[in-house]
Image (tube, rainbow, N blue to C red):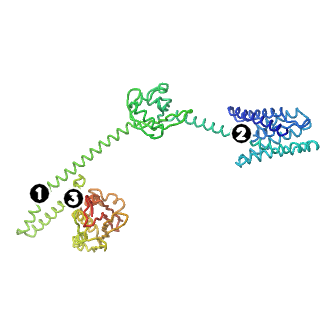
């Protein structure tokens, strides 16, 4: 009977504690007000338990006040515990009897232990784990048993022997259950508070943001809400926008618009570019970023709208300008190619007549004039050839030949071509051919030799003293296409990092001044780079001022026994 009576009293208190938690969740007051109200609720539940106690003897009553007051200190705080303990102590004093001093001590001690455990909880999270809460309940009720020293010895002995064990078995477990109930309430209140704050934050952001925001019901396409920026942008009042079908703004066919809303609501597509119609009939191009959000338990599309009309117009203008520039560039290339042909024809005739003059009697002065005429004609012809080659490349009319290339012989001939000029400048011209370099390969011999002559000619031109080395080898990586690597190294004037950035720009030289020491059209390296790209290779340069330069040409290698269809290189 003792166990049953104690359990009935505790069950009543647990039920009242649940009612207490429901009431407390609906209180919206300042912190102190909530604490006092919570204390009053705790005290009320305690009094109900004390009204229906388990009576052991005259003046000796037992109930669940220790559980409730300990929970008041742990979850309500000092003020709640003080109010609840005060109400309980006042009532117990009014009852009087033999157990009044013990009852008041239990009330005060339970509330104090609850407040102390609350402080422990802040630094020791395990204090509110199930094991920690059970120990908390055990501590409170050990205090209760200890308070029996305030009773006469015979009464204290009777309590310890009759209900001491039931109290230590039942009350700590009941304390654990009540505390778990309050912990769950705390979690729910925290989640509700976070939800309220999140919705309030979203509402503030929605209302005050400069971007245009719309909330749209995905299935019907009805505008649920719009912010002030949307009101200003579309020209409608907010009451007009709310409840308006999005079809009045978005002129897409209904089926297509519904499909886009479905994609957005399922998270399959978030970005759209559409035409939106304003209230005055103006159509603007907008970028819409739309994602599903939960608002008030309803799934809506949160759409952010940016006007990109000017951006789209600028893009269209750029496209038109680019096409015009490309057309102009092609026309320029065709014009230069045609003019080069037209000029080269009479120039070849002029050079032929100059050569015929060599067979006529001339005095020393006339021979000097003829030498100058032939030199100037050759310079002009080289310039025209460079312009013609560059024009063909830019116009896409240069076709590469695919035939056998006597690679090692071509490299020797290139060095022989410039050996006399190098000797005049007292330069050492070296040739370094690797053993693995093949005698033959497949490619365009004319264009390859054009690149080699240009690179070696530049090295001789820009080197005042020292040496020039032409190196060649086969790079045979089993995981990649084999490459022919040709390097032209010199000890010439070199180039700065800034000069390297424009070395392959047409009509540009490292020294761009009109009084530059070295001549040339500035087209040679540009043509070399374009030809290399057509062959599927690469041309790069490394250089330092005063320490020379190294141009590295790499071309795909194809054996001479194999001429692939469309193969662009060696």
Residue ID for mark 2: 181
Q: Position of residue 237 (x, y in %)?
A: 47, 25
Secondary structure state at the residue bearing disc 1: helix
In this view of the protein, which residue sits in the foreground, 449 or 24? 24
Label 3 SS:
helix
Quadrant location of residue 527? bottom left
Earlier in the chain: of badge 3 and badge 1, it is: 1
Alpha-carbon neighbours of circle 1 within 10 Å: few (<14), some, or many (≥20)? few
The residue at 68%/40% (across/down) is 184
Left or right of residue 442: residue 145: right
Q: Which mark is residue 530?
A: none
| Mark before the other along the chain sequence, 1 or 2 | 2
- Residue 384 visible in the snapshot: yes
Screen quadrant of the C terminus:
bottom left
Instruction: Answer with left or right where residue 118 lies relative to residue 366.
Output: right
The residue mark sitting in front, 2 or 3, is: 2
User: Residue drawn at (88%, 40%), measured in percent from left and top?
Assistant: 102
Say if residue 522 shows up in the picture: no
Q: Can you identify the residue that label 3 sits on?
A: 386
Q: Is residue 214 left or right of residue 358?
A: right
Q: Which element carries disc 2, helix, strand or loop?
A: helix
Q: Disc 1 and disc 2: Cα gap in Å?
A: 106 Å
Identify the residue under disc 1. 346
Q: Quadrant of the N terminus?
A: top right
Query: How far separated are the C-alphas under marks 2 and 3?
Result: 91 Å
């Amino acid at each position: 009977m003792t166990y049953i009576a104690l359990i009935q009293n505790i069950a009543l208190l647990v039920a009242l504690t649940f009612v207490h938690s429901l009431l407390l969740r609906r209180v919206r007051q300042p912190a102190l007000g909530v604490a006092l109200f919570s204390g009053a609720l705790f005290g009320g539940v305690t009094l109900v338990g004390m009204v229906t106690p388990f009576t052991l003897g005259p003046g000796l009553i037992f109930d669940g006040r220790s559980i409730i007051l300990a929970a008041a200190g742990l979850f309500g705080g000092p003020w709640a515990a003080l109010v609840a303990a005060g109400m309980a102590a006042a009532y117990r004093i009014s009852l009087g009897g033999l157990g009044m001093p013990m009852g008041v001590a239990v009330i005060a001690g339970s509330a104090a232990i609850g407040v102390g455990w609350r402080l422990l909880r802040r630094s020791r999270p395990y204090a509110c784990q199930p094991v920690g809460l059970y120990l908390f309940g055990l501590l409170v009720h050990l205090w209760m048993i200890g308070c029996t020293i305030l009773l006469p010895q015979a009464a204290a002995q009777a309590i310890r022997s009759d209900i001491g064990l039931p109290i230590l078995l039942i009350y700590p477990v009941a304390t654990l259950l009540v505390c778990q109930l309050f912990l769950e309430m705390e979690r729910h209140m925290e989640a509700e508070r976070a939800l309220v704050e999140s919705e309030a934050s979203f509402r503030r952001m929605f209302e005050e943001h400069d971007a245009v925001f719309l909330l749209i019901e995905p299935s019907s396409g009805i505008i649920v809400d719009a912010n002030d920026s949307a009101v200003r942008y579309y020209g409608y009042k907010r009451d007009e926008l709310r409840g308006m079908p999005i079809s009045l703004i978005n002129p897409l066919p209904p089926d297509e618009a519904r499909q886009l809303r479905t994609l957005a609501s399922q998270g399959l597509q978030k970005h759209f570019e559409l035409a939106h119609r304003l209230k005055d009939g103006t159509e603007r191009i907008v970028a819409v970023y739309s994602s599903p959000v939960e608002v008030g338990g309803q799934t809506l599309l949160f759409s952010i709208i940016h006007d990109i009309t000017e951006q789209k117009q600028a893009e269209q203008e750029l496209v038109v300008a680019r096409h015009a520039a490309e057309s102009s560039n092609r026309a320029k290339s065709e014009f230069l190619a045609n003019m080069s042909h037209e000029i080269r024809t009479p120039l070849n005739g002029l050079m032929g007549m100059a050569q015929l003059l060599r067979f006529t009697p001339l005095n020393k002065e006339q021979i000097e004039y003829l030498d100058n005429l032939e030199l100037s004609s050759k310079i002009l012809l080289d310039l025209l050839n460079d312009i013609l080659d560059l024009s063909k490349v830019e116009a896409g009319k240069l076709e590469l030949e695919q035939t056998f290339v006597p690679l090692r012989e071509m490299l020797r001939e290139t060095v022989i071509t410039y050996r006399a000029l190098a000797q005049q400048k007292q330069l050492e011209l070296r040739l370094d051919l690797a053993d693995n370099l093949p005698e033959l390969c497949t490619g365009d011999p004319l264009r390859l030799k054009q690149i080699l002559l240009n690179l070696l000619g530049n090295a001789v031109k820009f080197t005042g003293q020292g040496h020039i080395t032409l190196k060649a080898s086969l790079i045979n990586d089993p995981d990649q296409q084999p490459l022919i690597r040709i390097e032209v190294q010199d000890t010439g004037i070199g180039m700065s990092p800034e000069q390297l950035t424009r070395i392959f720009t047409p009509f540009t030289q490292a020294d761009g001044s009109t009084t530059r020491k070295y001549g040339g059209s500035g087209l040679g390296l540009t043509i070399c780079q374009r030809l290399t790209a057509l062959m599927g290779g690469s041309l790069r340069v490394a250089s330092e001022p005063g320490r020379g330069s190294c141009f590295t040409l790499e071309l795909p290698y194809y054996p001479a026994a194999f001429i692939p269809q469309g193969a662009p290189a060696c």
